[in-house]
Amino acid sequence: MKILLKMNRLQSRYHGCLCHERIVLSSWAYVPFQAGCKFKDVRRNVQKDTEELKSHGIQDIFVFCTRGELSKYRVPNLLDLYQQCGMTTHHHPIPDGDTPDIASCCEIMEELAICLKNNRKTLIHCYGGLGRSCLVAACLLLYLSDTVSPQEAIDSLRDLRGSGAIQTIKQYNYLHEFRDKLAAHLSSRDSLSRSVSR
């Protein structure tokens, strides 16, 4: 629980990025989405930005953008570039403003938990860093601690990222139903596993 609740702003040339020693929750300005484009007064360079992520010790990257978004923002090979730089890439596409199905979310939680257990510095990002990324970060808080309420997880992310964190009613409701859906999914998965092993 304390992993995400005690994040501080990363003191570097990238603003709008929140981090902890092992989990980084990023906005699009931190990630090399506008490669070769101008953002405010900074011209983006995908290679340089990816090397910057590597220099900050990022080992794993969870990307929630769809392949269509990556193409739209002129970085169709971003996932390959991350891997070429030696970063393990976890691609879990979630349409903008949407939520993952519970099986996909469970897979994301399990992968993030492994990263934390192995002390791997991990970046999670979507396009804006407010909707899908904050949804996953809030789910992680609920997944790691039974004492955090859905509203506390939402409030924590909004304290860190601003009032725009958790952008849609669908995302808000998803967080309030997360534990029940997760329990049902895990129970179903365990039942299926037991029946197959007989």
Image: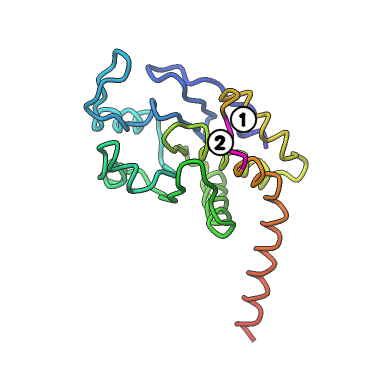
What secondary structure is found at the residue carrying circle 1?
Answer: helix
Nearer to us in this view, 91 or 3: 91
**Of callouts 1 and 2, the N-terminal one:** 2
Q: Quadrant of residue 149?
A: top right
**Residue 69 occupies which quadrant of the picture?**
top left
Q: What crowding class fits label 1: few (fewer than 14 Cα within 10 Å), some (14-19), or many (20 or more)?
A: many
Q: Which numbered disc covers residue 23?
A: none
Q: In the displayed orientation, state which residue is furthest to the front.
A: 169
State the residue position of label 1. 157
Residue furthest bottom in the image: 198
Relative to residue 146, is residue 170 drawn left or right?
A: left
- Is label 2 in a helix, a strand or a loop? helix
87 in the magenta segment: no
Which mark identifies residue 134?
A: 2
Q: Position of residue 156 (x, y in %)?
A: 66, 29
**Numbered range of the magenta stretch:** 165-169
